Image: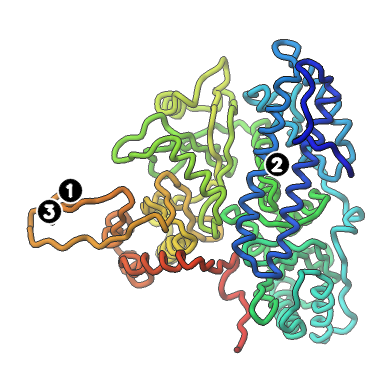
Amino acid sequence: MTVSDESSAEPPSAGAATPAEVAQRIADAFTNFDGEFLSITRRAQTRFARREWHLHQFDAQQRLALHKGAVARMVERLDPIIPSGDPQRTFWQDTKVAYADLIEGRPDLELAETFFNSVTRRVFTTVGVDSALEFRWFGTTAFPRSELESAAVATYHRPRSDDPGAIAELVAQILGRYKIGCEFENLEADAALIAARMDRRLREVWDTPTFDGIDMLTPVFYRNKGAYILGRVRHLNRVIPLMFALRNTDAGVVIDAVLMSESDASRVFSFTRSYFHVEWEYTGELIGFLKSIMPMKPIAELYTAIGYNQHGKTALYRAFYRHLEHSNSRFEIARGTKGMVMSVFTLPTFDVVFKIIKDHFAPPKKTTRREVMDRYRLVFQHDRVGRMVDAQEFENLSFSIDRFPPDLLDELLSECANTVEIDGDQVVVKHLYTERRLYPLDLYLREMGTARARASVIEYGDAIKDLATANIFPGDLFAKNFGVTRHGSVVFYDYDELALLSECRFRKVPDTDRYEDEMSSQPWFSVEPNDVFPEEFPTFMWFPKDLWPVMHEHHGDLFDVTFWKNLQNVHASGELADFYPYPEELRFTRVA
């Protein structure tokens, strides 16, 4: 398809454009954005084959900025050529109609609509939803039927023989058809490992190793140092995921793990991880297939997981408003210890929390609103390694005032007055973040039984170490700033004091012989803003008394400055650590 280059075209004089011309410009801008997005995505195969991990990270950050940049440029170019005042609204309604005609039949229709809506909301500073100007659909969406999935999905029938060797041959045949730009170290040996594990897994879930067929997605999913080949195993009316996790080693590509449960698949597509690079024109086909093997995963998270985070926001927005239309539940202050930087509330029947930055932060907080937003932006761009929650940023949302109990409304109007206001029967929120709702770790430790509490303490230490290995220091180590997922993972979700590990200065507390120094509430030595004293961490880590031995046994090194300085040296060397989005016990063991 050949399109005009909106980035180089001279804009016509003010008032000269027609709705059809503006619609064409927006459609061309979307096509250009989509081309850039796919061009960067396409490089993932080469990065994996050549083991260019740093370049892949750079590509990921570059791709994240594309949508926002394309929308901003489009709005700037439209400003002098569309009418102002009252005629603007009618003009835009006609533009929307013309745009709908232009994108009809596109394989990525839903993404094109979201791009138009993003432009619309910038042009009009839309508050809430404006159905006349935006593509609004709060109903259900149909994914492609199975007979239309032939290009996206390849189907393989079970061999007639029940011999494990026949299944291994089928697996080798499947994997051998994928073009990943490099050779397997020993495909036959890996196929035998996979066949044996498939046999055990099918007996566990179906009481028989028999299956009717295997459906495999055509494109390969790339992220960080890994590549993933995705499919599903069918038996009668049942399906289970079939995911092959690939690593590229010095000796060649190996299958690191095969994942065959909905829980394991969901972890791979977790909202705590970076986005996949996967190239496919018909995005709806991918989402429909993914939903078939992860039915509990929200559509919004699936779009976000494959890199279309802006449409993921749209899908979340629509799902939430659709939920409001079918429920009478009211917002409530989120469970957990109240923070000094954010007011946090939730709808009990919807698995999301809403976070609004307060107007003022009580001591000892010294950060600013801009710094808080910068830290959320850092998390958005950084590798979250399964330990930081993805946050979606929204502007100008409106909710019925009936949804807010008096105590919550009073808190928002008093502590977030610069961001929250009442307009008639609507509560208007100028800016907020949404995150998946988690079980606050401090409550989890109090409310769960001993076994789960002990496991979560170990997970908490692992989370801090994983973040540090990814060059992130949480800053505030209170348990209230961490949460527990439904899989039992502990993740970080409060970013107002987050910093890059490489920018911290880890120090030992100086020795003193003076009793007055030891008893003083203030340090007797100079402390710079980036100074961190690991031996003081226990002061900020609240646990029930009987759980402290667990922390010291498994993670006592966190209280030693040497641990942190060694990690800083690793980061300074440029080495990128390995993070696996599946349990260690699922990885294949290879004898050297």
Residue 88, label in figure: none
Q: Residue at x 72, y 10 (%)?
A: 86
For disc 1, the marked residue is: 522
Image quarter where the C terminus lies is bottom right
Q: Residue at x 41, y 51 (%)?
A: 443
Image coordinates of residue 225 in percent, x first then y, are 63, 66
The colour scheme of the drawn protein is rainbow
For disc 2, the marked residue is: 311
Q: Is residue 550 visible?
A: no
Q: Identify whether 274 is placed above or below 185.
A: above
Residue 519, label in figure: 3
The amino acid beneath tag 1 is Gln
Q: Identify whether 365 is placed above or below 403.
A: below
Image coordinates of residue 365 in percent, x first then y, are 33, 40
User: Could you tell me which secondary element the residue under label 2 belongs to?
Assistant: helix
Instruction: Judge the density around disc 3: few (<14), some (14-19), many (≥20) Cα neighbours within 10 Å.
Output: few
Relative depth, front residue between 30 and 217: 30
Numbered marks: total:
3
Instruction: Judge the density around disc 1: few (<14), some (14-19), many (≥20) Cα neighbours within 10 Å.
Output: few
Q: Assess whether mark 2 and mark 1 are in contact (beta carbons under 8 angstroms).
A: no
Q: Identify whether 86 is placed above or below 380.
A: above
Q: Residue furthest bottom?
A: 592
Image coordinates of residue 362 in percent, x first then y, are 32, 35
Indicate which disc, 3 or 2, sits on the residue closer to the N terminus.
Answer: 2
Instruction: Judge the density around disc 2: few (<14), some (14-19), many (≥20) Cα neighbours within 10 Å.
Output: many
User: Could you tell me which secondary element the residue under label 1 belongs to?
Assistant: loop
